[in-house]
Amino acid sequence: MQPENGDNGDDESSAPTHGRWSSSAVLSDLISPHSTDPKTTSTCKVVCLTGGPCGGKTSALSILSDLFRNLGWKVYRVPETATHLLSGGVVFSELSPQQTYSFQKDLLTVMLSIENTYINLAKLNAKQGQKTIVITDRGAMDPSAYIDRASWLKILAELNLDEISIRDHRYDCVVHLVTAAKGAEQFYTLSNNSVRSEGLELARHLDNLVMNAWLGHASLQVIDNESVPNFTAKCDRIVQAVLTRLGVVADNEIYGRAVMKHKFVVRDFVLTNEFPVPFRDFEVEHIYLVNPTGDGSQIRIRRRSEQLSAEEHLSMTMRRVGPNGQMAESRRNLTHREYDILRGQNDPTRSIVKKIRRCFLFNDRYFQLDVFQSTKHAGLMMLEGYLDYDSEETTNGAPAPGVNQDRLPPWLQVEEVTKNKEYSMYELAKI
């Protein structure tokens, strides 16, 4: 498969074997903050910036680049492939269906090749102990928004690619910047991109297509225009989203904590009910591990597979208390061998948590609807999403009643339990 050379996952052959290492030794190596081995640390990160026309990708890419350089990271910026190809005289609206298919196939091929160049360099940097971030202007799923589903799947088959692999394994974080045509129409312009010609309605339509193309990615963040007072605040939210998803600590006095993960218990709903928006369903398994450091951090591994697909995404998440008291998460991909070894380090006080996870978008917000399949809480349904409360009154950091109800899916009856520790997955897994 073509993306393997630049895939952000690790090479299967690099994982230690059962005969050489115990599960505790492997875990200690993986979570060590001092190791410079790219196979045991997450010193190479790949972030994809995507979105509709005039969403602010160029500005965000520059801001993120400056920030990570100041934090001591090496930064590689991957230019937008489509813009380079279109600037050579291609007028997309003039292409025949056959030409459109050929263009999107070649676009994906070139995009992956360019990305692999930077990702491979980043991995070599990591071997030398240099933290490196690769920031891409659009990503491998974007071409699927500009072609019908059947043609997209045909392209993947011809290139020997798997959709789940290029969507879920390749990028640590995907940030969708909503077009200014939705909520900031007075600032919508195409003057900074000579090969674009979309009007407001087409820009909104394309924005929705691109957003849905990434539906299912575990770390998709959608940054809209209506919940921020200006573009500067939008850029701050982009920075915060990336820092949060990568588990990087920076100056929270600058970027704030306005957006946080909110949790809701869902009542009187089953997955077989009519669902009014597109969605993707996944089978998810979480296993909590014994932390060999004893520092109070929570460590869990996750197996995630899309229903009706044999492809799996394996990862490890570590939750630490940050300097501001907020829980900071860091995540890295695992090989199958690493995952199997780490299962031997499972926490005997916690049961394996199995869920059906439904991912969907509503009002430019990304939600995950989880139905617990195991433990004593089987049947419990919870909704999670990153929501903002910065424009409303708060009490002790908790949102005021009724805040952002327009952001929540109206077909679900929910009760917010964000501050209730009994509904943390760590507590729910307790035996």
Image (cartoon, rainbow, N blue to C red):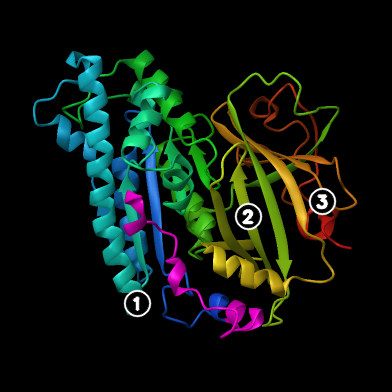
- Which residue shows up at 41% across the image and 58% down it? 8
Is residue 55 in view from this perspective? no
Q: Dot 1 lies on which element?
A: helix
- The answer to whether 175 is drawn above or below residue 200 in the figure is below
Question: Measured from the top left, where is residue 374 in percent x and y?
Answer: 83, 50
Q: Dot 2 lies on which element?
A: strand
Depth check, mark 1 against mark 2: the one in front is 2
Task: State the image quarter where residue 278 is shown.
Answer: top right
**Residue 12 magenta:** yes
Q: Dot 3 lies on which element?
A: helix
Q: Which mark is residue 12?
A: none
Q: Which mark is residue 423?
A: 3
Question: Measured from the top left, where is residue 17 in percent x and y?
Answer: 55, 78
- Which residue shows up at 58% across the image and 79% down it? 26
Distance from label 2 to label 3 (Cα)?
Answer: 21 Å
Task: State the image quarter where residue 362 is shown.
Answer: top right
Mark sitting earlier along the chain (1/3): 1
Disc 3 residue type (three-letter): Tyr
Depth check, mark 2 against mark 3: the one in front is 2
**Residue 210 magenta:** no
Q: Nearer the viewer, residue 73 or 189?
A: 73
Q: Nearer the viewer, residue 115 or 398?
A: 115
Is residue 271 in view from this perspective? yes
Q: Horizontally, is 174 left or right of 96 in the view?
A: right
Q: Which mark is residue 303?
A: 2
How many other residues sit within 10 Å of disc 3, few (<14), some (14-19) or many (≥20)?
some
Disc 1 residue type (three-letter): Lys
**Residue stretch in magenta:** 1-28
